[in-house]
Amino acid sequence: MVHSGLRVVTALAAAGALLSACGGTGSPGASASKTIKVGLVTDIGGLNDKSFNHLAYVGLQKAKSDFGVQGDVTESHSGDDYVPNLTNYASKKYDLVIGVGFLMQQAVGTVSGQFPSVHFAIIDGAGTDANGTDLKHSNVESLFFKEQDAGALVGVISGVLEKDGATPKKSHKIGAVGGVSIPPVNHYIAGYKWAAKMEDPSVKVFVGYSNNFTDPAKCAGVASSQISQGADVLFQVAGGCGLGVLQSAGQAHVYSIGVDADQKDADASVIASALKRVDVATYDAIKGVKDGTFQGGALTFSLQNDGVGYQADNLQLPSDVMTAVQDVSAKIKSGALTPPADIPDPTVP
Amino acid sequence: MAASSTAAAGRPAPPLAASLRRAGRAVAVPAGSVVFAFLMGAVIVAVTGGNPFAAYQALICGGFGLLCSGGENAGLQVSNTIVFLTPLIMAGVAVALPFRAGLFNIGAEGQLIVGAIACTTVGIHFAAAPAPVLLPAVLLAGMAAGAAWAGIVGVLKALTGAHEVVTTIMLNYIAQWLLRFLIIGGPLQLHNGFSVSSPIGAGAHLSTLLPHDDKLIVFGLPASVYRVHVGLLIALLAAGTYAFLLWRSSFGYEVRAVGQSQKAARYAGMSVRRTIILTMLISGAFAGLAGAVQIAAVDHNLTDKYFSDTTGFDAIAVALLGLGTATGIVFAAILFGALHGGGAVMQSDAGISGNLVYVLQALILFSIAANFLRTLKLRLPAVGRAAGTPAAEAPAGALAGESATALADDEGLA
Amino acid sequence: MTVLSDIGHLLLTADLWHAALAAAVLLLLPALGGVISERSGVVNIAMEGMMLTGAFFAVAADLILHDPWLSALVAMVAGGLMALIHAVVSIRFRADQIVSGIAINIFATGITVFLINRFYGLQDVGHLPPSELLPNLQIPLLDQIPFLGRVLFQQNVIVYVALILLLLVHVLLFRTRLGLRIRAVGEHPEAADTAGINVYRLRYGAVISSGLLSGLSGAFLAIGISNTFVPNMTDGRGYIALAAMIFGKWTPFGAFIACLIFGLGQAIYDNNSIIHVSQYLLSMLPYILTLVVLAGVVGRSQPPAADGIPYAPGTE
């Protein structure tokens, strides 16, 4: 399920190994003198969330084996755990404390202010105050992802397939199932809807939410409803819950699209996956601390820097689809096209 | 607890040896149950290839700041545990009071959520108000909202007989959805793209014991990391109020009478309906207070975390483990708070899944339920249950003297 | 008003009722288990935990055995073993049955994730291919009936099993000697004991049955509707089943009606992509409806007289 993520990591790791080899000849004592300690704090999804917590862990594991850093993990069981879990690592003078998830913004903002000498990184957010304002602490690296770029690419795939009449029902209707209506989820859906409509203006895009990230049956229900409405390509943006979308699509013999990691193996209906390289971001953040190149501030992972992307899966995509994807991809990278961060026309399918 | 000592003083003083024996027995059995649970947990860790000693060392470190080996700050661990246990006391009382009346309040969670919502709403709307006005206002708003939420349960139960287990579960879900409605795209949302509310005014902040200062160093860490707050005192006050209400007030007498036998209570001239409604109102106020204190002292705004919060459910275990007595609830909350804090350290230091904590909690409950309650034949009155156990088999004494009085009263009733 | 017309329109579609029935069955199985257990006099709020355990072991077994039927059986046994703990603690040791039930639920939450961490590392639990899942079963001919065919005869195999079990449990409880005995034990254990009925054995059987049924529901969730285990995937269904059981006044068909209300609410909610109202308010619908129906129509729910009271011969 994380094949492509791993592949990217491997490539990066090779580069990293090269770099550290070069650096190693320059200052041999630097890395040997002290083991870098990294603490990873998950959000309530936990490590087995089949989503970004898991990917962050994959990145940490990779860094452990590549750099010999000490990497420890704490799963948060409730929202009350974020501050204490982050504080625990910071108070033990860990070199880098990573918070996974949008929901930890305020916690990271608070704790990073208390421990200015500890590095922090946060996936999908910044260290904020209670007003949601980025506190811009110099010891915090905010790792944002342009999910809309990845959403747009799989949206192009869906749109062109619909335009070509190459989908199972030729219905010009597609769907997206979100976990909860929060920015990281809606970004994906925004890009998806925008791009699908761009390729096939007649396409209808149903957007539904399961309000859940852990229960596949809930997402299967929302997916079934969209299939009843005629949707024949379904994009899941709901972590572990969304596996139900993929499976519903499989049972109804329509197409589905995975999210975050390559979900090819989750179901035969998965024609592509939108990738969000949380593992790479995590790995890079650790590498930055190790190399002394850590920089506070916002870091955006987009199509341009390969921080998001897509992966073709269980369907041989027609050549015009590939052409369109490459075209849009190039335009997004060049800035000629900018996928929206908010879902366009939210009340119109 | 003050009430319990006066209650004890009100009766002829038992011989010292007897009361020592009684106290020893009261403490020995729950302590034994905890030990038993930890032994079983150790077996589970060992069988699955972990090191139980390392696991427990980290657990104790995280819970109580003792035996730390990973460089943890003892003060920080104790402080975290206290922050965790504070709402458990209030919510625990909110579950325990209805238990005494034979009502099973699974709805403390929903009542806590609406308490948090009301506290936040008032705290935002009157953000500019001065603290002496605003702080009491937000706490009272939380209590009122919790009381109203639980009041629905009480009224439906009293008037239509609608079972409180169903209504509380329904109201939990409704409260959760109300929360999401308000903070995601709804009237309380901070601004687009956030799943949190605006922060409450500074006047609504319940102060921490140490100043909220990142620069002041206390025990080697910035003072602001120690989040112990005045809410702890409020929680203890709530527990004391509960004990007083239950043992020293005529209302408490009615609650216990209704819990033992509604029929008998009715014959004795009590209004069962009135007692049920009042019980739920007060219970909801305690749970609402837990939510309000959490907002006023810790969070300062309403976040999506309340959607998946489990304090109200943990409180059921705390109330049961504490045998429904104020002292017992406080001790049970300490244990659960310490386990909560310890789980995280156990995972980071010993690499043992923090979920072992749930296994331990369950084992403690099992062993308490299976041995302690059986041995002492002291059962909480529950739904539809007939009158208490025969006097001959009911030795006095639970965790505190109050249970002894309870039994005495109960026997008088039966 | 468009909301009402949206929903009204949906109610005329077979797909909606199809989804509602499947969602209801997930709740019906544990609710039936609860009915049997409580009819015998043992309070059971542990369906959530037994269901979660069943879901976990269904997936764990299927990954090894590659056989959904055997795996469903393993899930039932796992649910049954959890129930056995509840039975031993509350019947043999005469413990407080609510404490024991709560403990089961907490235990299941902890042990499932603990076991994942131990046996699958911090990696994903694997996915199962469609051939290793509990299959959908189209009943020949009947599935062609307009509307009803879609609703009733194009379901997962467990849906049919559950509907048959609904009938069986009803007949068992109210039309057989065994059922009479179970109810007698739940109402007047002393009298039943005097009449030569083995109170303990019946209660053990009833509680274990509740575990088997809840475990089966967990299997349906994990290897029928879904194809993997996700921590906490039961998401409170055991508690909804508990509410359904009480709502239905401890009768199988009463519980089924309540399950249908929740199933229908879920199915309507699932259409939130085409209903023009806040999805959050839409989510409240089944719960508000239940409150209203409970208060207005159903009224007092009286549990079996001896429900929750451990039986100790000779003490009463």
Image (cartoon, grey):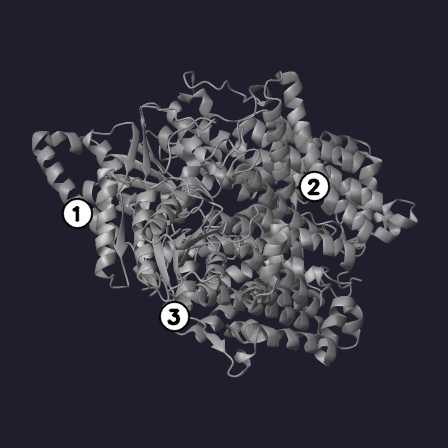
A105 horizontally vs C246: left or right:
left
Q: On the image, numbered disc 1 is attached to which residue?
A: A11
B140 horizontally vs B70: left or right:
right
Amino acid at circle 1? Ala
Circle 1/circle 3 CB separation < 8 Å = no
* Chain of the residue on which disc 1 is drawn: A
* Chain of the residue on which disc 2 is drawn: B
Instruction: Give the crowd class for mark 1: few <14, some 14-19, many >=20 residues within 10 Å.
Output: few
Task: State the image coordinates of residue C73 (x, y, percent, origin top left).
Answer: 49, 73
Amino acid at circle 3? Pro
Task: State the image coordinates of residue C282 (x, y, percent, origin top left).
Answer: 59, 50
In the image, residue A121 above or below residue A51? above
Q: CA distance from mark 1 to mark 3?
A: 34 Å
Q: CA distance from mark 2 to mark 1?
A: 57 Å
Q: From this viewpoint, is residue A253 visible? A: yes
Secondary structure beneath label 2 = helix
Instruction: Give the crowd class for mark 3: few <14, some 14-19, many >=20 residues within 10 Å.
Output: some
Viewer-proximal residue, A202 or B318?
Answer: A202
Q: Total of numbered circles in the picture?
A: 3
Instruction: Give the crowd class for mark 2: few <14, some 14-19, many >=20 residues within 10 Å.
Output: many
Checking the image for residue B149, the label placed there is: 2
Viewer-proximal residue, B10 or B360?
Answer: B360
Q: Are marks 2 and 1 on the same chain?
A: no
Residue A33 occupies quadrant: top left
Q: CA distance from mark 3 to mark 2?
A: 45 Å
* Chain of the residue on which disc 3 is drawn: C
Amino acid at circle 2? Trp
Checking the image for residue C130, the label placed there is: 3
For the N terminus of chain B, the quadrant is: top right
Q: From this viewpoint, is residue B13 visible? A: no
